[in-house]
Amino acid sequence: MNKKADKKGIIVVKIGGVALSSQDTTFEDVVALQHRGVKLVIVHGGANIVNRWLDKQGVATSFVNGERVTDHATLEMVTAVLAGLVNKEIVANINCLGGRAFGLSGVDGGLLGARAGDKTMGFVGRIEHVAAAPLLALIEADFVPVVAPISLNLGCEAPHMLNCNGDTVAGEIAAALGAEKLIFLTDVAGILDGSGKLINELSASEAEGLITSGVAKKGMIPKIRAGVHVLSNKGIVRIVDGRQPHALADEVAGRPAGTTIRL
């Protein structure tokens, strides 16, 4: 494996609940790619799992443009589930398959710094700072960093943590690292047009146009916006169907399906 990590060739992979099923092959792919020396950073979500735990506690939840409205009770649950249960389950899966993964949240090492934005969204962070050094150090030590999307509150006021959208976090990390590629493993075939047909490739402006026209909705909105942010750093953005066996390995091997967003 590469013993000196730099920013060249890093691939950031955003995974959600699609990668947590017992039939999924994403973690097998991560281990195989790591053994080949591919430099990976994983950012995960887990909205469905958070929803399940919120339901158990009788806490109502809602979304606006793919982002969860977050009050105090929701923030506590999101932090516990994402930075705890989901993050450690992903790390355990990779390590048990023979890989080397290191789990952390955006709070650890000051990786992510954010401020609360729209008050109607509650304690949702808008990221202002990404510290690349902890991730590069982990890559240099032959670990795959696995990042939960919880950030430090730069406002230095309670609460000291903020909930951040996982897609947005993936885009910010990819931009900070100058990643060559950002891959979203989703539960859809890719970006679809108004008639439900897969769009194989589109430009950043065309992708933004899908949001403006209302064709891109809900969880696809933060993916597109995160992707456009990465494109300003000359990366490539891929949105692919993570439900397909070995979708990640196929993507890295150049056997792509799904949608490409380019400059």
Image (cartoon, rainbow, N blue to C red):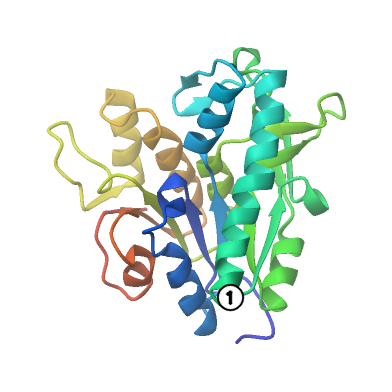
Residue at the image position 54 percent from the left and 25 percent from the top: 68
Q: Is residue 134 left or right of residue 120?
A: right
Residue at the image position 57 percent from the left and 20 percent from the top: 69
Q: Secondary structure at mark 1?
A: loop
Q: Is residue 116 left or right of residue 158?
A: left
**Residue 61 image position (x, y, % from top left):** 53, 18
User: Which quadrant would residue 96 be assigned to in this image?
Assistant: bottom right
User: 108 above or below 150?
Assistant: below
- State which quarter of the image contains the N terminus: bottom right
User: Which quadrant would residue 3 be assigned to in this image?
Assistant: bottom right
**Residue 141 image position (x, y, % from top left):** 72, 78
Residue that mark 1 sits on: 99
User: 239 above or below 2?
Assistant: above
Q: Residues within 10 Å of mark 1 (few under 14, many from 20)?
A: many
**Residue situated in front as seen by the camera: 45 or 48:** 48
Residue 151 visible from this viewpoint: yes
- The kind of residue on which mark 1 rests is Gly
**Residue 52 image position (x, y, % from top left):** 51, 30
Residue farthest to the front?
56
**Residue 161 image position (x, y, % from top left):** 77, 33
User: 117 above or below 119?
Assistant: below
Q: Is residue 250 left or right of residue 14?
A: left
User: 134 above or below 130?
Assistant: below
Residue 127 visible from this viewpoint: no
**Residue situated in front as seen by the camera: 218 or 127:** 218
Residue at the image position 15 percent from the left and 36 percent from the top: 196
